[in-house]
Amino acid sequence: MWRADYTGKRILFKVKGEKHSVSKVRDVAGVEPEKLASIEEFVAYAVTENRFRQALTVVFGDPKRADVKRLGEVIKWMSQDVLKEEADTLEASGLTWKEVNGRVAAKTREMFFALDV
């Protein structure tokens, strides 16, 4: 238990040692800022409004009938289309599908919830 006085107030906090640690991870894997920037650039390039509207049309017929219950289908369509149509760009960027897939899905989800239908 650590105690300190700060601006006239007593502050208490508990610190647990290594034996109470939930995980046994010793080193945290670092992420290269350049790689993150490259992933974000690729996602901005590939996950476009036009592609998103096309996904809505394919999944719902009419984008105004978009339903959150089928969001997974929209994400799946977007992911498959990006992988199929942008594989060469992905490779030229030095990225793998595994590195960008999560961000493609997240961006699609963001676009879905920003819909004004």
Image (spheres, grey):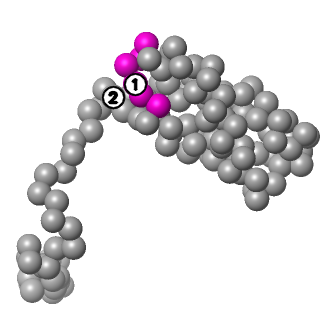
Residue 112 relative to residue 56: left or right: left
Quarter of the rendering containing residue 4 = bottom left
- Is label 2 in a helix, a strand or a loop? helix
In the displayed structure, would residue 105 be above or below residue 51? below
Residue 43: image x %, image y %?
A: 53, 29
- Label 1 to label 2: alpha-carbon separation: 8 Å
Q: Label 1 is placed on what type of residue?
A: Leu
Lower position in the chain sequence, tag 1 or tag 2: 2
Counting from the top left corner in percent of width and height, residue 55 is at 76, 35
Q: Is residue 60 left or right of residue 68?
A: right
Mark 1 lies on a secondary structure that is loop
- Tag in front: 1 or 2: 1
Q: Tell me what residue is drawn at x 15 percent, y 83 percent.
A: 14
Q: Does 1 lie within the magenta span?
A: no
User: What percent of the width, then of the height, locates residue 95?
Assistant: 40, 24
54 relative to 115, above or below: above
Q: Is residue 102 left or right of residue 2?
A: right
Main secondary structure along the magenta-highlighted residues: loop
Badge 2: residue crowd in 10 Å (few <14, some 14–19, many ≥20): some
x and y percent of residue 29 in the render? Answer: 21, 45
- The amino acid type, in three-letter code, at marker 2 is Lys
Q: Is residue 30 visible?
A: yes
Residue under numbered circle 1 = 95
- Residue at 9% x, 86% y is 1
Residue for badge 2: 35
Instruction: Report the magenta residues as a range.
Output: 92-97
Whether the residues at callouts 1 and 2 have beta carbons within 8 Å, the answer is yes
Q: Residue at x 85, y 36 (%)?
A: 57
Q: Mark 1: give few (<14), some (14-19) or many (20+) Cα within 10 Å.
A: some
